[in-house]
Image (spheres, helix red, strand yellow):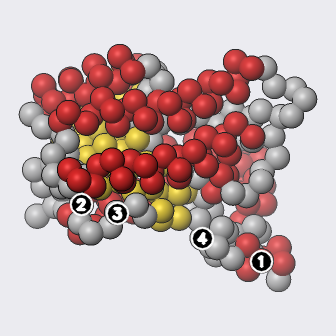
Amino acid sequence: MGKLDGKVALITGGSSGIGLTAARLFVAEGAKVAITGRNQATLNEAAAELGANALAVQADAADPASMERAVSETVASFGRLDIVYANAGISSPTPLGGTELSVFEEVLRINVTGVFFTVQAALPHLKEGASVILTGSTRATDGAPARSAYAASKGAISSMARVLVTDLSPRGIRVNTVVPGATRTPIWKKSTPEESAKLEAGQARTIPLNRMGDPEEVAYVALFLASDESSFVQGAEITVDGGARSAPLGAPVYR
């Protein structure tokens, strides 16, 4: 018996990286899963892999009408909606002194406004016991250079989550946040395996556990928050970063 038997999940940004890994895990645990993304070809590949219990919907998380359509298609196909994993986001660099307004605003539009309107689109279908999962980032607090918009957007997720907890607790709907650190996903890959290995080794030196995370390790936290095992977990932020946020001076670079 799976941990998500009988449940229906919507995962935005579910066609690659952590979102796709979570979709695989949710399906394996008995859920029917709708994934969204902007690239139809990537979505088609993901849907073919996930099988009959998955639905792929091309949608832009920053467009409320697009997300309303994605929610409607999910409910039309699977009959209900129990889990919303608002995972879609971008991480464009925004260096001070060299950033166009449009680039800065797009990060906030997708990462903040898009998350809010994803939850709003799903709200009419969510019932008591439903789970909303947001995606934060350790970039909200680590002061990484040239990431002002991204850091601000993920700090906003933490603040927004507290309000959503207040708004949705009377309806018995839970809201929690997964906060990944450096994780081995396609966005970290460089042009050659050697460059990727060098980047990963450099990241590992800043992480107490001396390695980057795997997307499965983030997905299992999302699974816990999606399942009834976390039925009294409300307003939590669970950081999945090998200790980099909680104990930065424990990293190998300081040993």
Q: Residue furthest bottom?
A: 255
Disc 1 from disc 2: Cα separation = 34 Å
| Number of the label disc, if any, that sits on residue 227 | 2
Marks 1 and 3, the one that precedes in the sequence: 3
Marks 4 and 3, the one that precedes in the sequence: 3
| Callout 1–callout 4 Cβ contact below 8 Å | no
Question: Which quadrant of the structure image shows residue 224?
Answer: bottom left
Q: Position of residue 174 (x, y in %)?
A: 29, 55
Marks 1 and 4, the one that precedes in the sequence: 4
Mark 3 closeness class: few <14, some 14–19, many ≥20 residues within 10 Å:
many
Would you place residue 205 above or below residue 61 in this image?
Answer: below
**Quarter placement of the C terminus:** bottom right
Label 4: which residue?
Answer: 242
Label 1: which residue?
Answer: 249
Disc 1 from disc 3: Cα separation = 30 Å
Q: Is residue 13 visible?
A: no
Disc 1 from disc 4: Cα separation = 12 Å
Label 3: which residue?
Answer: 234
Mark in front: 2 vs 3:
3
- Provide the secondary structure element on which disc 3 rests: loop
Mark 1 closeness class: few <14, some 14–19, many ≥20 residues within 10 Å:
some
